[in-house]
Structure formats: C-alpha cells, structure tokens
Amino acid sequence: MKRSYERLLQGNKNWASEKLKQNPNYFKDLAMGQNPECLWIGCSDSRVPANEITGTKSGEIFVHRNIANVVVHTDMNLLSVLYYAVEVLHVKHVIVCGHYGCGGIIAALSNKDNGFSNNWLRNIKEVYDKHSNELEAIADPKERENRLVELNVVEQVMNLAKTKIVQQAWERRELQIHGWVYGMSDGLIKDLHVMHDEITDLSPIFRYEL
C-alpha cells in the first residue's frame, strides 16, 4: 500500500498525463503566465479548494488561504498577496469566502485554550464581541455559529476596504470586493451581497488621503 505522500506524487503523474492527453500544449500555455481576474481569500480547510468549488481552471483565480479567511492589517503574507494581485495582476474582484462548519469559527466560539492559535482566533472573537447582541439573541448554537461565519466574512470585506492597496486601486480603476460563504452540506456558494467598490462605502476615519 502506498503511503499518503507517495499517493500524492502518483496522483500528480496521472493528472499531468491526463492534461497532456486533452491538450498537448496545456503546460506550455500555463508557463506563459497568468491573468486571473479574481483574488480569492479563503479558509485553509482542505474541503474548500477554490478552483474545484467554482469550476474554474488553473490560472483563473489567484488564491490566499488562512484559518477562517481572516484579513489582518498586520499580516504581511496576506498584504503581499493582495498587493501583487491588485497592482501586478490587476484583478477586478477580491472575494472573501468563508464556509459553514469552519473549525476556526467553532474554536473561536469556545473558551478552550488553542495554544498558539489563540493569537489568530482572537480576530474572530473580536468579530463576535462586536456583534454579541445579535449573536447571543440566537438560541440555536448551530445557527449562531453559522451567523458568525457570515459576520466574519462581512468584517473581513470591510478590513480589505480599509487597506491603502484597495483604496489606491479605487482611485485609478474598478475593483470590487465580495463576501461569500460556501455550504458544506450542499456545495453551493451564498453571496452575502456586501460588495464594496468605492471609498464612499467606508467610514471617513479609515480613508487615506491619496
């Protein structure tokens, strides 16, 4: 029996062979460069691969993933991805996509010690605290969890709008930010309709003088 990592290597060979059968120039074309129209900021959860759940091909979506799809203003990794996507690739859409049943959300709802992850999960706890009146009025724990998933996406969309990178893009061209949630139980994506495409959507204190 192949070990798990060996199975991955064999799977890669099978996949590459199949792609070449379909199109002998597949990898040559990919090597020419990428021109994605979307940046996807999603959760690291292994069940939520951006290309697969959107039915898109390699090269169509630029992807950043972290636990619970959080946008933190001190996260140099995310900001570097955002800068490259907006300033170099000139994406037209930035999508924050959460998912129901998110382990990060579930952990943030508890008072358990999650070790080093506590530092990251605090960002979600602060979303909960901001919306505590609404969330604590929801009696069913699962419904409360699902609503926090949605509110977390909404807050991360706003966090993107607060970056200089996004605001500079708005000054020069069209860029839209969207908030979505993927459903594990049906495989469908829910649009939360929290799109932002101009600085007037933002509180004045967060607007840069550009």
Image (cartoon, rainbow, N blue to C red):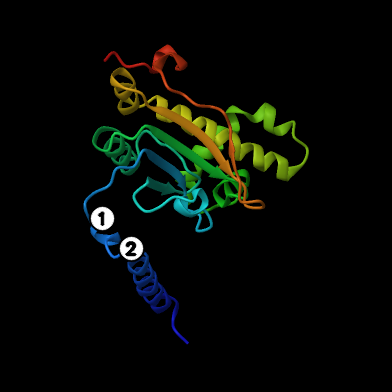
On the rendered structure, is 157 left or right of 85? right
**Mark 1 / mark 2, whichever is N-terminal:** 2
Indicate the position of residue 85 as horizontal and vertical percent values.
Answer: 30, 38
Q: Is residue 163 visible?
A: yes
The dot on residue 23 is: 2
Q: Nearer the viewer, residue 131 or 185?
A: 185
Q: Pointers 1 and 2 in contact (CB under 8 A)? A: yes
Q: Nearer the viewer, mark 1 or mark 2?
A: 2
Indicate the position of residue 147 as horizontal and vertical percent values.
Answer: 65, 37
Q: Amino acid at mark 2?
A: Asn
- The crowd level at tag 1 (other Cα within 10 Å; few <14, some 14-19, many 20+) is few
For numbered disc 2, what is the local secondary structure?
Answer: loop
- The crowd level at tag 2 (other Cα within 10 Å; few <14, some 14-19, many 20+) is few
Residue sitting farthest toward the bottom: 1
Q: CA distance from mark 1 to mark 2?
A: 10 Å
Residue at 45 percent of width and 52 percent of height: 51
Residue at 32 percent of width and 16 percent of height: 208
Q: Amino acid at mark 1?
A: Asp
Residue at which label 1 appears: 29
Answer above or below: position of 66 versus 159. below
Residue at 62 percent of width and 52 percent of height: 184
The dot on residue 4 is: none
Indicate the position of residue 78 as horizontal and vertical percent values.
Answer: 35, 41
Q: Quadrant of the C terminus?
A: top left
Q: Nearer the viewer, residue 58 or 139?
A: 58
On the rendered structure, is 112 left or right of 4? right
For numbered disc 1, what is the local secondary structure?
Answer: helix
Q: Nearer the viewer, residue 68 or 88?
A: 88
On the rendered structure, is 112 left or right of 33? right
Residue sitting farthest toward the right: 139
Q: Is residue 116 visible?
A: no
Residue at 37 percent of width and 65 percent of height: 22
